[in-house]
Amino acid sequence: MEQRLYLVALNMIDGLGSVKINRLIGKFKNAEDIFKADFNELSD
């Protein structure tokens, strides 16, 4: 259930579409890890 909340939050971010979300999940393995990542990890 918690992962679903993180996915909903990602979908609410302006300019972050499904392609970018899928790329992020491919890199971080799950939506929660995306929110836990620091700026440098996200900008790579």
Image (tube, rainbow, N blue to C red):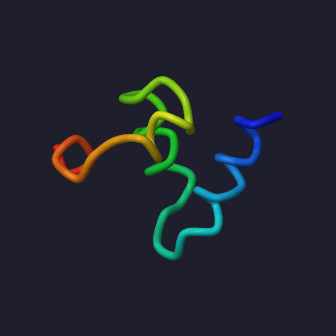
Q: Residue furthest top?
A: 29
Q: Which quarter shows the N terminus?
A: top right
Q: Residue furthest bottom?
A: 14
Camera-side residue: 20 or 2? 2
Question: What residue sits 75% from the left and 37% below the top?
Answer: 2
Image position of 42 (left or right of 10): left
Could you tell me residue 8's position as x and y percent?
Answer: 71, 55
Q: Please determine whether, in this image, residue 22 is positioned above or below residue 19.
A: above
Question: What residue sits 16% from the left and 47% below the top?
Answer: 40
Image position of 42 (left or right of 5): left
Question: What residue sits 22% from the left and 41% below the top?
Answer: 41
Could you tell me residue 18's position as x and y percent?
Answer: 57, 52
Question: What residue sits 42% from the left and 41% below the top?
Answer: 36
Could you tell me residue 10's position as x and y percent?
Answer: 58, 56
Image position of 18 (left or right of 25): right
Total marks shown come to 0
Image position of 24 (left or right of 17): left
Q: Please determine whether, in this image, residue 9 is positioned above or below residue 6.
A: below
Q: Which quarter shows the C terminus?
A: top left
Q: Which quadrant of the structure image shows residue 24? A: top left
